[in-house]
Amino acid sequence: MNLAAILICCASVSAGFGGPSPGHLLAERWGVPVRLEAQSVPTVRLADRLPIRGLSDAPLVVGIDALFWHATDADCTRGLEALDALLRAREGKPLILGTVPPIVAGQGCRAVLNAEMERRCTGHCILVRLEGDLLPTELHPGREWSERVLARIYGIQARRAGGMG
């Protein structure tokens, strides 16, 4: 895959708080820059950042925690719409998502979003299940956790036809 840059749609972990994110480590290994877009915070969700500049055209989009703050919404509609927008924009193009881990209180939409990602993240979409050894023990888990996530991404890709590079 010829990459000009990796587009990261993210919350704080993917933005690099607490250490390099899986997307940053991937870019580092491939020698390409990272472009952060649509960063979400507790008061601003991914849906608030749509449309995302370059989402359809980027060679690879990484959104390990893209839907994290949507899991804390009382109504899951906007989170599901944001997931739909990501998947439609990336149809047939590489996208890496992560399930929402249970690490903050009030995640009423976590199960709904995770189930929908499980159901719809197929084909060129890789879903990293942030559970078991990949369950973060804190909000900003750091480089060691990112390395484990990246290893899982490579493992998932190795089991599929084709390759990421």
Image (cartoon, rainbow, N blue to C red):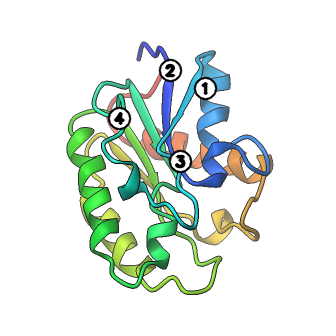
Q: Quadrant of residue 118?
A: bottom left
Indicate which disc residue 27 carries.
1
Q: Nearer the viewer, residue 114 or 11?
A: 11
For label 4, count other residues whose C-alpha is less than 10 Å away and answer few (under 14), some (14-19) or many (20+).
some
For the residue marked with disc 2, what is the amino acid?
Ala
156 above or below 53?
Answer: below
Q: Quadrant of residue 124?
A: top left
Cα separation, mark 2 vs mark 4, equals 13 Å
Is residue 117 found left or right of 146 in the rendered image? left
120 above or below 70?
Answer: above
Cα separation, mark 1 vs mark 2, equals 8 Å
For label 1, count other residues whose C-alpha is less than 10 Å away and answer few (under 14), some (14-19) or many (20+).
some
Marks 2,3: beta carbons within 8 A: no
Marks 4,3: beta carbons within 8 A: no
Marks 1,2: beta carbons within 8 A: yes
The residue indicated by pointer 4 is: 94
SS at mark 4 in the image: loop
SS at mark 2 in the image: loop
Q: N-terminal of the two: label 4 or label 1?
A: 1
